[in-house]
């Protein structure tokens, strides 16, 4: 690694590819009887959900850090989009960063986001427009339970939307897996490129969801200041959904391993049948090759070759030998 490629700790450098995405702010301020939407940054007494789309404008990111007193190491993690999936917490905040799958126009895409949760503010940071979070605006406006609770409920709501998205994608992968199983059973072969792409997506989804599930369980065991008691029942329901997702992914991984073994067995069986057929044909032609070689010798005195019906007799003997060998092979069920 070159020394110029090294960033010192707390460096605010965006490591993603979407530098063309202009950084914009969607700020939602809400309370029991209030809902307002802005496109600026401001401290408020009421609860806020702030959506930051586009991470390349370091000046705006510095402004966020200073205004909301976010730790420099957290900001570094937000801008480093190659982070491992994790949930961590300090005395007065919870931070999560993770990659996830999003179904966009029937195509499954990989996305990255970070969530920063303090007592009154929830930030989500995105490289591209988060269409999957579009229901949040309606929920903030109409869902009284969301408006009445603190930022921990908003954190739950975001994780719940992503989990539901993953469950929907999982159902789609499950249907594809069932189609592959039918193809293996009926046609005895599969499109290996499609199968390995499906296998890759299942493994990726497993790697995305399992760390968040395990760390969220650990977070609930802590008496963290952000996590209120009245919201814990919602988190337990979310964990139940995550547990179901994790179990189904484990089942799909086992099923994939079984289907891969079955496909390999089918290919081996098919190859064995081909080799068996070729061997049988080779075995049939061994005595025929001997006969043609024997009677094809250029001896001077070979009276049988001068017989009038010698050719017909020779062909009849060859057919008889081949027929007898086929009968023997069939009797022993060699093919």
Image: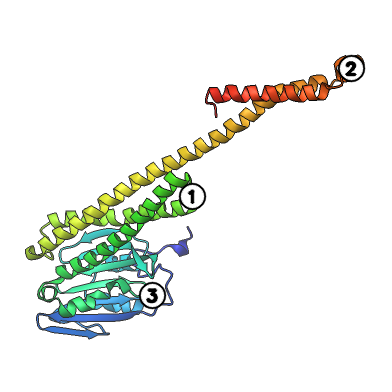
Residue at image position (23%, 65%) is 159
Name the residue tied to disc 3. Answer: 56
User: In the rendered view, would you say 207 is above or below 163?
Assistant: above
Circle 3 packing at 10 Å, graded few (<14), some (14-19), many (20+), is: many
Q: CA distance from mark 3 to mark 2?
A: 92 Å
Name the residue tied to disc 1. Answer: 192
> Where, quadrant-wise, is the C terminus in this rendering?
top right
Q: Kindly report which numbered mark, 3 or 2, lies closer to the viewer in this rendering.
A: 2
The one nearer the camera, 156 or 4, is 156
Residue 243 shown left or right of residue 34 in the figure: right
Label 3 close to label 2 by CB (< 8 Å): no
Residue 223 shown left or right of residue 250 in the figure: left
Name the residue tied to disc 2. Answer: 299
Circle 2 packing at 10 Å, graded few (<14), some (14-19), many (20+), is: few
Q: Position of residue 158 (x, y in %)?
A: 23, 68
Which quarter of the picture shows residue 321? top right
Which quarter of the picture shows residue 65? bottom left
């Amino acid at each position: 690694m070159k020394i110029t490629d090294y960033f010192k700790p707390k460096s605010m450098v965006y490591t993603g590819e979407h530098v063309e995405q202009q950084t914009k702010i969607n700020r939602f301020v809400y309370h029991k009887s209030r809902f307002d939407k802005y496109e600026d940054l401001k401290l408020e007494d009421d609860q806020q959900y702030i959506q930051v789309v586009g991470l390349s404008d370091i000046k705006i990111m510095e402004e966020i850090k200073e205004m909301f007193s976010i730790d420099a190491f957290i900001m570094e993690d937000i801008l480093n989009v190659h982070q491992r999936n994790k949930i961590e917490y300090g005395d007065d905040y919870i931070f999560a960063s993770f990659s996830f799958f999003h179904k966009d126009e029937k195509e499954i895409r990989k996305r990255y986001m970070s969530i920063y949760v303090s007592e009154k503010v929830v930030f989500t940071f995105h490289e591209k427009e988060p269409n999957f979070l579009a229901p949040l605006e309606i929920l903030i406006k109409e869902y009284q339970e969301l408006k009445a609770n603190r930022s921990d409920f908003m954190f739950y709501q975001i994780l719940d939307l992503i989990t539901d998205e993953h469950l929907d994608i999982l159902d789609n992968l499950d249907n594809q897996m069932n189609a592959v199983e039918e193809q293996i059973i009926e046609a005895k072969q599969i499109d290996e490129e499609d199968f390995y792409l499906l296998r890759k997506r299942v493994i990726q989804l497993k790697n995305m969801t399992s760390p968040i599930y395990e760390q969220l369980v650990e977070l609930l065991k802590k008496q963290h200041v952000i996590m209120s008691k009245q919201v814990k029942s919602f988190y337990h329901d979310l964990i139940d959904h995550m547990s179901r997702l994790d179990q189904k992914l484990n089942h799909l991984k086992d099923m994939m391993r079984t289907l891969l073994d079955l496909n390999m067995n089918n290919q081996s069986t098919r190859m064995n049948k081909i080799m068996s057929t070729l061997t049988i044909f080779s075995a049939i032609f061994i005595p025929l090759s001997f006969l043609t070689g024997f009677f094809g010798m250029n001896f001077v005195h070979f009276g049988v070759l001068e017989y009038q019906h010698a050719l017909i007799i020779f062909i009849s003997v060859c057919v008889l030998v081949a027929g007898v060998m086929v009968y023997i092979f069939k009797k022993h069920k060699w093919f």
